[in-house]
Amino acid sequence: MRKILGLTRYAVVVPAVASIVGALLLMAQGSIEMVMVVIDSVMSEKYLKDTIVDVLTAVDAILLGTVLLVIGYGLYELFIDTDLEVPAWLQVHDLDDLKSKLIGVVVAIVAVVFVGVFVDSNRADEVVAYGVGAGALVAGLALFALATKKTDKSPKEKRA
């Protein structure tokens, strides 16, 4: 029974690979969109604000791809192969590591979306609502990270 339970960890391979494939797709689409924005901006007389919104939309797709990549790598590293060769900042040793990495990327996405709304003249009336919502979300994530943060101190150090 113990052996069977140990093998169930490999069920995570499917969502990990799916996350990585989704990440690659979003990053490719975001990059293609960025190239198209550059070509369109150079070839036509497009307003700067429209170009900014288009660039931020492409960046948003790339950042969302980054979230999926972090999730895919993190799940794979946590459940399958702890010796996966990734940069030090992407290494995941426990769920708290994965959580903190995801919070950082989500905050970046929220910032990009807010700036997109801020510069989009067609949505000027939504800026305050988005700003308050984005601020509340970032504050909530910060509180969550702070409240669930592990301390690295041993029991002996805590008593001292």
Image (cartoon, rainbow, N blue to C red):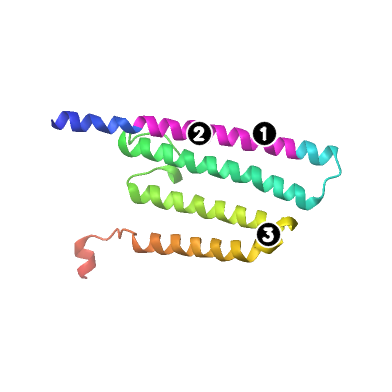
Q: Give the range drawn in magenta.
A: 13-37
- Of the 4 image quadrants, the one containing the N terminus is top left
CB-based contact (under 8 Å), mark 2 and mark 1: no
Residue type at numbered disc 2: Gly
Q: Which of marks 2 and 1 is nearer the N terminus?
A: 2
Q: Which residue is outermost to the bottom?
A: 160
Q: Where is residue 5 in the image (x, y as percent from the top left)?
A: 19, 33
Q: Position of residue 143 (x, y in %)?
A: 41, 64
Residue 40 image-quadrant placement: top right
Which numbered dot is residue 32?
Answer: 1
Residue at mark 2 = 22
Of 51 and 83, the residue lying toward us: 51
Nearest to N terminus: mark 1 or mark 3: 1
**Where's the C terminus, which quadrant?**
bottom left
Q: Which residue appears farthest toward the right when viewing the image?
A: 45
Helix, strand or loop for disc 3: helix
Give how far across and how far down residue 105 sits, in percent. 50, 50
Q: How crowded is mark 3: few (under 14 residues within 10 Å), some or many (20 or more)?
A: many
Q: Mark 3 points at which residue?
A: 118
State the mark number for residue 69.
none
Left/right placement of residue 58 relative to residue 151 reads right
